[in-house]
Each structure stands twice: as structure tokens, then as C-alpha cells.
């Protein structure tokens, strides 16, 4: 009987794994790019498409569609409409295929889309630059092109509206040609020297793209593309990165499964500088002293820790619902604060806490229990990067660091459709097994209009 139970359990795991794998679309085709002209010429096929009743297919607004074509179950060119209700309408257009009754939507099992795009090339900081650069920008700076997948959607990205599920991670087999490039890179594959290359991955990835004229290094399981540091510094930076990865792996019991790739590049604007992650790639954007080298300094190392934490909150666990953004950024920031306190310096940690508390002086947040829409954050930057981590720091004062790691691990490993407030409460309850303590946390931090005052009392000892 025990043997039969074990076999049943193993088969169930394999079935669940196969279902999960089937939910990832596959992208095939080719793209021709010019970094000097700012152009894309794409011919892609999206297949293995899950059955979805209400959907859109996002493609960057700068791309001009030649046609969509159903390949399976039937072969024909499809008429398409555009949804103007999509949340990423600024960067992308949201396409769908109306059915014959014009009330429902038709979604083929396999669809081809051909399109071209031309974008500005900001190749100097004197007269030919943009006012602003941002993550979802298809950024040509004269030497390279940088484009994430989730926000800029340079390739077709399927979005399940009813389940708030973005299929930006795809298996892929694509050919990239760029005659004025020396190096080609797409997320999940090693960079390639040359003007043409075929990239393939059976592991679903968000297709972060970085092609152009640059060198790269691979040291201790870490890639650095377009480095602004020498060989010795590359080794030091790779060691630093691996040390942080090992710390997170030990605390959560969940391993990183790919080499980390760092991209160092410049913005299309004059003043912007920031980092973002499209795992396994971390992108550093900045001019001059704001390159990769700056991240080796004591006070900026927490930024590296934050981006590495996004492997767990954002990739290993995909977040959605009205609190998805807060859960992703808030816990990534909190994890980086724990690492900072342990490995970088208590002074750096305390400065971060003090600064976040100071930001609360001019901010009146809604408690997490009352968030219904993204607009309820009021100030998204302050809510997700400052207020949320402070809430978690205060909860840590109530239950201890060990219990906080247990809660985060429970969040990461608990299957759910929506990562909403009820999900947060249920995972915390499961981690604590202490109803009285849960009620204290709810009343002081998660559901209280006086949460900021309670946070200050907990963290400042007032």
C-alpha cells in the first residue's frame, strides 16, 4: 500500500509539472535589428497557447503590424482589434481577435505575427537625447539596443485577463540578425560574438534583449556584459554576487538555477540612472560613475541584493492582483535589508530604516487590507519600496527573523491563483500557527489606519 501511495504521489507530481510546463507558450521565428537605424523587422510564431477566454496579445506601440495569421487549427490571416482598456497602453498595444459574432474572442492554438518598428536613436548627450528613459523603453543609444520583455513587449506577450496572468515567460527558438552589432544577447542564453545567432531555451524566460557593440566577461558563474571594470574587479564583483546568492539560498532553501547576467549600459536621457531585473538578467543603467563599478561600494551594495531577491519574488513566484507589485518589491527590499544587516553593515541597514521612516512624515498610506486598486498606493514608489518593507520590519519585531524567512518561504511555495491580501494572511497564518499573534499583526500593521505610528513605535522604541 505504501509503495502504491508513493507511486501515486510521484505520478501526481509529474502530472502537475507537465501541466505547468504546458502553460508556457513557445516563441519561434526571427528578428532583424539595426542599432544605428533603430529598427526591428520581426516574424514570430506563438504556439502552445493555453486555452484562455479573455485575453490580449501585447506588442510594443512602436511596432507596425503587417498581419496576424492563424496557423493552427486552420491556416488563414486573422482580423484583429485593439483593446484600449489595457493597463500597459502607454508602451504597448493590446491586440485580440474577435470571433464571428463580434462578442467573444477567438484565440488560435498557434499564431504568426509579422511587424516592423523604427525607434529614435539617442546617440549623444548634447543634442540627440531623450528627456526620459525607463524600463519599458526600447532604448537605442547608437551602440546598443536594450529592451525588456514584460513592459516593452518587443515580442508578442499573451495576457490572461480573467486570471491576471502575464505569459511573458516563453520557451523560445529564435534567430537574431544584427549586421551592425558585434555581440548578441537574449535572456536565458549565453551572449554570442557575431552578427547572427540562433538562441534556444526549453526553460521559459522573459526575453530581455541586449544587442550591439560591446565585450563581455564570464567569471565564477556570472556574466557581465559591457563591463566598465577590469578583470580583478570583475572577479571581486562576481564573488560578491555569489556570496549574496548563497545567503538567500541558505535562508529559503531554494537555489538559483541559472548564472546571473549583469548588463551595463547608458540611458537614452542625460540624468536617469537605475537598475531593474528580468531574471536571470540584472540591468544597470547610468552614465559615467553610475556604472557597474559604483555597485561595488558599501552604500550601493543593497541595490544588488534587492535585484537578486527578485529571483524569488517576481520569477520563482509570479505575483499578481492589486497587491502583486507591493509583494514583489516590498519583500525584495525587505530581503535586501536583512542581507544588508547581516553582510554589509548594521550602519547601512539602520540608515535605510531611518530614511524610510523619514519618508513616512509626508505620506499617509492605506493599510494593505484596504488596497483594491493600484491607484490606492497613492505614491507607488513610497508604498512599495519604503512603507511595505517597514511593515515587514515591524512584523519581524513581533515574530522574529526566523519566522519571517518561514513566511517568505511559505509565500514562495504556496500555489494560488491570486497573490492578494487573503493570500498574504493565509500564508502568515500557516507560518505562525498562532492565531493570537496573527490578530496582533493585523490590528497593528496590516489593517490599521495608524500603521505608520505603530511601525515607528516598533522600530524606534517609542
Image (cartoon, rainbow, N blue to C red):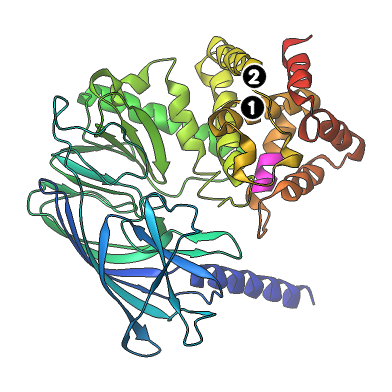
Task: Determine the residue positioned at 75% across, 74% down.
Answer: 5
332 vs 145: above or below: above
Q: Are marks 1 and 2 in contact (CB under 8 Å)?
A: yes
Mark 2 = which residue? Answer: 360
From which residue to which does the magenta span run? 407-411
Mark closest to the chain's N terminus, 1 or 2: 2
Residue 310: % across, % down? 50, 40
Up-down relation of residue 261 to residue 53 (above or below): above
Front residue of 374 and 279: 374
Q: Position of residue 39 (x, y in %)?
A: 16, 54
Nearest to viewer (mark 1 / mark 2): 2
* Image quadrant where residue 454 sits: top right
Magenta span: predominant SS is: helix
Q: Quadrant of the N terminus?
A: bottom right
Expressed as whole percent of the image width and height from the top left, the position of residue 286 reads 29, 27
- Assess whether residue 300 is covered by the magenta stretch: no
Please indicate whether residue 200 sits to the left or right of residue 84 in the image: left
Pointer 2 local density, CA inside 10 Å: few below 14, some 14–19, many at least 20: some
Query: Label 1: how many residues lie within 10 Å, few (<14), some (14-19) or many (20+)?
Result: many
Q: Secondary structure at mark 1?
A: helix
Q: Is residue 182 above or below residue 114?
A: above
Q: Relative to 375, is 73 on the left or the right? A: left
Which residue is identified by label 1? 387
Q: How many numbered marks have been drawn onto this rendered protein structure? A: 2
Amino acid at each position: 500500500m505504501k509503495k502504491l501511495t508513493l507511486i501515486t504521489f510521484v505520478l501526481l507530481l509529474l502530472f502537475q509539472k507537465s501541466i505547468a510546463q504546458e502553460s508556457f507558450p513557445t516563441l519561434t521565428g526571427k528578428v532583424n535589428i539595426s542599432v544605428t537605424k533603430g529598427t526591428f523587422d520581426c516574424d514570430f510564431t506563438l504556439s502552445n497557447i493555453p486555452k484562455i477566454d479573455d485575453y490580449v496579445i501585447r506588442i510594443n506601440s512602436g511596432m507596425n503590424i503587417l498581419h496576424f495569421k492563424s496557423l493552427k487549427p486552420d491556416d488563414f490571416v486573422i482580423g484583429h482589434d485593439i483593446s484600449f482598456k489595457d493597463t500597459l497602453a502607454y508602451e504597448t498595444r493590446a491586440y485580440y481577435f474577435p470571433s464571428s459574432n463580434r462578442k467573444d474572442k477567438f484565440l488560435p492554438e498557434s499564431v504568426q505575427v509579422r511587424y516592423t518598428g523604427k525607434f529614435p536613436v539617442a546617440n549623444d548627450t548634447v543634442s540627440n537625447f531623450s528627456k526620459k528613459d525607463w524600463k519599458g523603453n526600447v532604448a537605442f543609444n547608437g551602440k546598443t539596443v536594450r529592451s525588456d520583455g514584460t513592459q516593452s513587449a518587443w515580442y508578442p506577450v499573451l495576457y490572461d485577463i480573467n486570471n491576471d496572468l502575464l505569459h511573458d515567460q516563453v520557451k523560445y527558438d529564435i534567430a537574431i540578425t544584427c549586421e551592425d552589432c558585434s555581440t548578441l544577447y537574449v535572456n536565458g542564453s549565453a551572449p554570442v560574438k557575431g552578427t547572427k545567432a540562433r538562441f534556444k531555451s526549453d526553460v521559459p524566460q522573459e526575453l530581455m534583449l541586449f544587442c550591439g557593440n560591446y565585450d563581455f566577461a564570464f567569471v565564477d558563474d556570472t556574466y557581465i556584459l559591457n563591463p566598465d571594470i577590469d578583470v580583478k574587479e570583475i572577479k571581486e564583483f562576481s564573488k560578491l554576487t555569489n556570496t549574496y546568492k548563497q545567503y538567500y539560498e541558505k535562508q529559503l532553501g531554494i537555489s538559483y538555477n541559472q548564472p546571473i547576467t549583469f548588463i551595463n549600459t547608458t540611458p537614452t536621457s542625460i540624468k536617469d540612472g537605475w537598475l531593474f531585473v528580468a531574471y536571470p538578467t540584472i540591468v544597470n543603467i547610468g552614465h559615467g560613475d553610475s556604472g557597474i563599478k559604483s555597485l561595488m561600494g558599501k552604500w550601493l551594495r543593497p541595490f544588488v541584493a534587492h535585484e537578486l531577491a527578485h529571483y524569488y519574488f517576481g520569477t520563482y513566484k509570479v505575483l499578481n492582483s492589486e497587491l502583486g507589485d507591493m509583494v514583489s518589491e516590498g519583500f525584495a527590499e525587505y530581503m535586501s535589508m536583512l542581507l544588508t544587516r547581516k553582510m554589509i553593515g548594521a550602519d547601512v541597514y539602520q540608515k535605510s530604516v531611518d530614511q524610510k521612516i523619514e519618508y513616512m512624515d509626508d505620506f499617509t498610506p492605506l493599510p494593505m487590507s484596504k488596497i483594491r486598486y493600484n491607484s490606492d498606493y497613492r505614491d507607488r514608489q513610497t508604498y512599495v519600496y519604503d512603507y511595505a518593507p517597514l511593515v515587514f520590519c515591524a512584523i519581524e519585531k513581533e515574530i522574529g527573523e526566523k519566522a519571517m524567512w518561514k513566511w517568505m518561504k511559505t509565500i514562495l511555495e504556496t500555489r494560488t491563483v491570486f497573490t492578494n491580501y487573503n493570500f498574504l494572511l493565509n500564508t502568515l497564518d500557516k507560518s505562525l500557527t498562532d492565531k493570537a499573534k496573527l490578530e496582533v499583526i493585523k490590528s497593528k500593521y496590516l489593517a490599521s489606519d495608524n500603521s505608520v505610528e505603530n511601525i515607528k513605535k516598533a522600530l524606534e522604541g517609542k
